[in-house]
Amino acid sequence: MYKFALIGASGYIAPRHVEAIKKSHNDLVALLDPYDGIGYIDKHYPKAAYFKDLKSFEKHLNDLRVSGNEVNYISICSPNHLHYEHIKFSLKNDCNVICEKPLVLIHEKIKDLKLLEKETGKRVNTILQLRHHPTIIELKKKYSKTNKIHKISLDYITPRGLWYDSSWKGNIDKSGGLASNIGVHFFDMLLWIFGEVKEYQVSNTDKNSKGVLILNNAEVSYNLSIKQEDLPWDEWKPYRSITIDKEEIEFSTGFTELHDISYNKILSGGGFTLEDVEPTIELIEKIRLG
């Protein structure tokens, strides 16, 4: 049984990580978040120690290490702009890392983390759950070895209210913009299947990101939006559409178990590495910069 700590316990995606830790039969012993609205944790780990500041959290990790009860993994679900510092913190405290998307916002930071991995002997794992989706795996088998240039259209419209603009997610310096915050998994999926980026064109606003990506085996037209008026219906719910050579790809189901699969792969030594995620991080940084 591995011992886990969690940074960003009040984050939207944090409960998925807690459930994955529980389902993989491991123990969550410590939590860090400045916001204490984390009552959901009682369902799984009511005895987990809770801290609001990094200094107290680090002292607890050290006390556990001295007593022979060291934490093996730190899961990171904090706001995007904090990932890099929290990954460094975790490695320097002798812990392996499981970090939510996007791993970092600045591509050059990955080089620093590679060096730190070597220094500490610990590993950084990132969550790229779409690579575990059965439909995406089949697409990989079907298209990754073709020489044809496929025409792809990606539309992802997920409306957000006024709160979004005032939150860290609406701050491009903290979230990385729409490509980092809502598009990263789709971009990773496309690069994983169709190869590296050869050319790109980008048009960004604070609520919309459009562009064209020329990949080894695909020409991708994409549209990411958080504007309600861009929805094809009146109902307040996301719209997601991916077509390949005008054929609609259906993968609206099968998402609930992907974090569980991700954890099982990581804990058995098969997680996604810094090298795996690097091309996507480089791309979303270029999209952000235009």
Image (cartoon, rainbow, N blue to C red):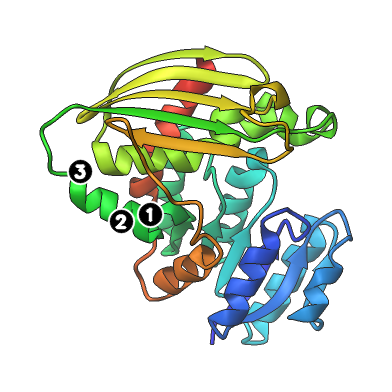
The residue shown at (45%, 61%) is 120
Residue 131 is labelled as 1
- Going by the numbered disc 1, the residue's amino acid type is Arg
The residue shown at (63%, 14%) is 205
Left or right: residue 220 versus residue 182 is left
Left or right: residue 173 versus residue 245 is right
- Rounded to the nearest angstrom, the CA distance separating label 2 from label 1 is 6 Å
Marks 3 & 2, CB-CB < 8 Å contact: no
* Residue tagged 2: 137
Q: Pointer 1: residues within 10 angstroms few (<14), some, or many (20+)?
A: many
Residue 143 is labelled as 3
Marks 2 & 1, CB-CB < 8 Å contact: yes
Instruction: Answer with mark 2 or mark 1, whichever residue precedes in sequence.
Output: 1
Instruction: Answer with mark 3 or mark 2, whichever residue precedes in sequence.
Output: 2
Quadrant in the picture for residue 226:
top right
Q: Residue furthest front?
A: 233
- Secondary element under disc 3, as helix, strand or loop, is helix
- Rounded to the nearest angstrom, the CA distance separating label 3 from label 2 is 10 Å
Q: Pointer 2: residues within 10 angstroms few (<14), some, or many (20+)?
A: some
Q: At which x and y percent is residue 171?
A: 73, 27
Look at the picture and state if 79 lies above or below 183. Answer: below
